Amino acid sequence: MTVKDIRTQFPILDIPVYGKPLVYLDNSATSQRPQAVSQELVKLAGSANANIHRAVHFLAGKATDAYENTRDFVREYLNASSREEIVFTSGTTAAINLVAFSFGEAFVGEGDEIIVSAAEHHSNIVPWQMLCERKKAVLKVLDIQENGVLLPECLEKLISERTKIVAITQISNVLGIINPVQEIVSICHKKGVPVLVDGAQGVVHSKVDVQQLDCDFYVFSGHKVFASTGTGVLYGKKKWLDAMPPYMGGGEMIKSVSFSGTTYAPLPEKFEAGTQNFNAVPTLIPALTFHKACLEDKEILEYQNNIKEYIYSSLTADSRITLYGRPESIQDKINLFSLAVRGAHHEDLALILDKMGIAVRSGQMCAEPLMDRLGVTGLLRTSFSWYNTMEEAEYFVNSLKKAIEMLS
Amino acid sequence: MSMSLDEKKQSVIEDFQLYDEWLDKYEYLIELGKNLDPYPEELKTDEHLIKGCQSRVWLDYHIQDNRIFFRADSDAIITKGIISLLISVYSGRTPEEIAADDFGFVAEIGLKDNLSPTRANGLVSMIETIKTVAENAR
């Protein structure tokens, strides 16, 4: 497979912006969707639209099959041990909120501790803060090194007898550094502490095997990995999900309801209250199928690696540019670069790049505490996906230099 | 004050029409930003901060002989250019003039449509702040 073959599956990449070719480099915010995904969405809405699970009629059966087949597919994709461990959510944020609430209800009390890292995005901070407020628990923060790297040995010291859970990102959406989650899980488990891995970026850049990783929870959003918006996955070990009370009450999640009391459905429905996003969830199949094909294609991996090395060396060679998230080896970093330019505001840069046809992100990137930690008000971020070309990378670097000159 | 409010707005619209390309318009805004009168560091407080912008924008004003005089600053240069443009049009006008104005010239030069939504929000916030100052001074 070549990058050209990939691009033909993404017609949106051919739309001109301000009369210039679109160069989409905001992939960490959301990926574009291949034709197979958009077609699946249209197909389901047009041929299998009925509310799932309860009704006995033909269409409901088709819709339910599409939805439940996706669960089996995702189970296999993540190598979870059973389909009961796969809960569909609206995305990463909803999944973390679910765990923070339900795990918190069952296992967190006054004076207990929860650990997150300094490199988390708001979605993996705020739900835990809310839990801490509710339960009078304490949120502790695992700091990062100056270069953005997280040290597992520091985590070991931070864990106490009161630590109830560690919630950590596999890859920060700002630093792009691949965290040593395998080691983190093993440290935590030695002390009997469960781990939630935020895979919002991680699932995009690695093949995930939750049994090998042995994490207790793994969450990700569909829209960052080529599926429809409003889809997301919570993987949780059965022993935890069984022990956790439901998050929301309503349809689907019940076994029997009466005014004297309600009993809940078994897993995974216990955590899927209300009408599910049944048109969109099945797009996870073509999305992850496409993604897996890319992850396993040596030619594509090498091409993307060349882009990463080119961007890294171009940006570090320019003394006006400061790059954030610089592990010792570039192998520990994904193709995501957040930077600041001396004398130029990130928003000005993004605005000028936009008019050159380049979509990048500027600002705090939903990680205000990390920005404070790095001592910046915001950064400019560029993030690449399978369909981005070396020509686009070169155009980005040249355009960035032009923008810097315009502003200085 | 040589030009009336309408004349000044017309002249800004004509200045903007000189540039076809948006990058050139940005160059022009960057120049305006660079030439904006200095703003006192001690007035860069939360009180003077305009909410709703991705970059930080500070606005201060004083009233003299029933005319409002604005000064402002931003840490982003294009934003500074935009606020400079607004100041060049509205500073030194009476509260009545500003309060009665519809700020339609901003749309006429295509500024609002060509900004990212966050930037457009910032522009709206700047206009709202200027309007509120004028309303309160009437």
Image (cartoon, rainbow, N blue to C red):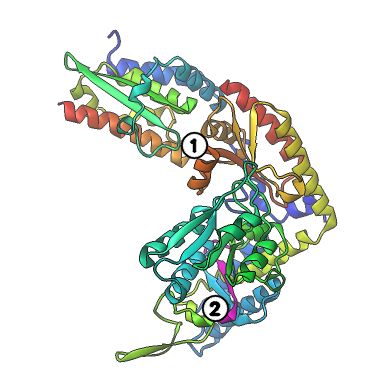
Question: Looking at this view, is A237 or A304 the one in front?
Answer: A237
Side of A323 where A329 appears, left or right: right
Q: Position of residue A36 (x, y in %)?
A: 67, 64
Q: Would you say residue A179 sits in the magenta stretch?
A: no
Side of A234 where A245 appears, left or right: left
Mark 1 chain: A
| Residue of label 2 | A240
Determine whether A78 is above or below A122 in the image: below
Query: Which residue in the rendered view is the most extreme toward the right?
Result: A299
Q: Which residue shows up at 25% across the image and 27% down it?
A: B101
- Which of the two discs, 2 and 1, labels the residue nearer the N terminus? 2
Q: Which residue shows up at 64% across the image and 70% down it?
A: A190
Span highlighted in magenta in the image: A228-239
Q: Is residue A107 visible?
A: yes
Side of B13 where A370 appears, left or right: right
Tell if the residue under mark 2 belongs to the same chain as the one under mark 1.
yes
- Secondary structure under tag 2 reads helix
> Looking at numbered disc 2 in the image, what kind of residue is underneath it?
Trp
Q: Residues within 10 Å of mark 1 (few under 14, many from 20)?
A: some
- Secondary structure under tag 1 reads loop
Q: Which residue shows up at 69% across the image and 64% down it?
A: A182
The total of numbered circles placed on residues is: 2
Foreground label between 2 and 1: 2
Question: Looking at this view, is A284 or A174 the one in front?
Answer: A174
Q: Position of residue B137 (x, y in %)?
A: 17, 26
State which quarter of the image contains the N terminus of chain A: bottom right
| Residue of label 1 | A377
Asked if the residues shown at circle 2 and circle 1 are in contact, with their CB atoms under 8 angstroms apart, the answer is no
> Looking at numbered disc 1 in the image, what kind of residue is underneath it?
Thr
Quadrant hosting residue A31? bottom right
What numbered label is drawn on residue A207?
none
Q: Which residue shows up at 73% across the image and 50% down it?
A: A332
